[in-house]
Amino acid sequence: MIPKDHPRYRSLVARERLARCAREGIVAMEGLAAHGRGEAFDYLIGEKTTKSAALAARTAAAILLSARHAVISVNGNTAALAADEIAALQRASGADVEVNLFHRTEERMALITRLLTEHGVRVLSGTPERLVPLSHDRALCLPEGIGDADVVLVPLEDGDRCAALRAMGKTVITIDLNPLSRTARTATLTVVDEVTRAIPAITAACSSLGPGEGERLVASLDNTYLLRAAIDEMRERLAHALE
Ligand code: PTJ
């Protein structure tokens, strides 16, 4: 039992959930290490949505809404932390949801699909094919899902696959607390924010974009600017950390 008045309640609940999901086989053991890295960067942005992340989230909504076929690619960590949030984003954006794993096993695919379905996500099913230019099972995706998509949202992605999806000509949106990661630098658009804050921000933006705002956001998208802004926000916080 985590006491509600613990100053780090949210973080402890997330860790507890990830540990439980790791024991159940939903989260890969490597996913726990990935979460720890994310937490460290979350400290640096003050565990809140920064101005540049809010702008990135609105731009992400604009891209999803104007896509021919948008797909949200869900891995173990994202399913464990944000199943309800994915269901809400799917409703708001009309995007398809595909389970796509770095550490792929049929058992984890089934467990994650069940978890998402229980939370109201409509998960694509079908026969995967080796369409992503990568070796081993990381090449697998659904021809009618990620294979067909022009826009793919890949929270907490591995840099290699992000680059491979870009090489396939897709617009790639990622959510990654580390603005220095290869994924963050390779994606078309990076939301430098914690996944349980970023997804609701994108969902809220889907229903609040003003007339013409989406087109303006897409036309002025500059991911390097957004990453620099995230780093500047971290630097600014560090400069005043002990005041
Ligand atoms: O479930 P699987 O098999 O698909 O595996 C998922 C992991 C996350 C293990 C896999 O994709 C992986 O190894 O990812 P990386 O290369 O460690 O990248 C994950 C990135 O997400 C890192 O840059 C972390 O800083 C960041 N991150 C971790 N937790 C969060 C996060 N970003 C946003 N919100 C988080 N909660």
Image (spheres, helix red, strand yellow):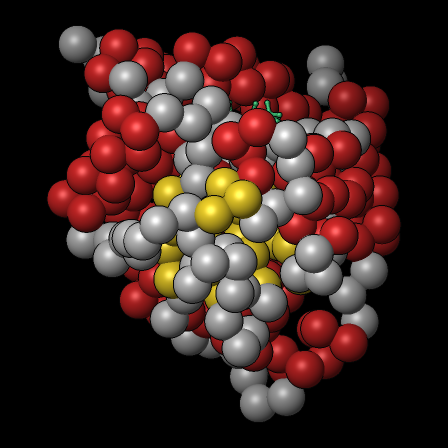
Q: Quadrant of the N terminus?
A: top left
Residue 200 can be seen, yes or no = no
Q: Is residue 99 visible?
A: yes
Looking at the image, which residue is at 72% across and 80% down? 216
Residue 8 in picture, x, y percent from top left: 40, 17
| Residue for point 65% across, 36% down | 134
Q: Is residue 34 left or right of residue 241?
A: left
Judged left or right of residue 59, residue 85 is: left
Q: Is residue 87 above or below residue 61?
A: above
Seen from the viewer's position, the closer of residues 36 and 21 is: 21
Q: Quadrant of residue 242?
A: top right
Please identify the residue farthest to the bottom as the structure is shown: 211
Q: Is residue 235 above or below residue 64?
A: above
Q: Is residue 22 left or right of residue 63?
A: left
Q: Position of residue 6 (x, y in %)?
A: 32, 14
Q: Quadrant of the C terminus?
A: top right
Q: Quadrant of ligand 1?
A: top right
Question: Which residue is depicted at the point 29% across and 53% down?
Answer: 125
Q: Is residue 159 above or below residue 38?
A: below
List x then y, in percent, for residue 120.
Answer: 19, 53
Q: Residue at x 26, y 10 (%)?
A: 23
Residue 21 placement: quadrant:
top left
| Count of marks, rendered view | 0
Q: Position of residue 237 (x, y in %)?
A: 74, 28
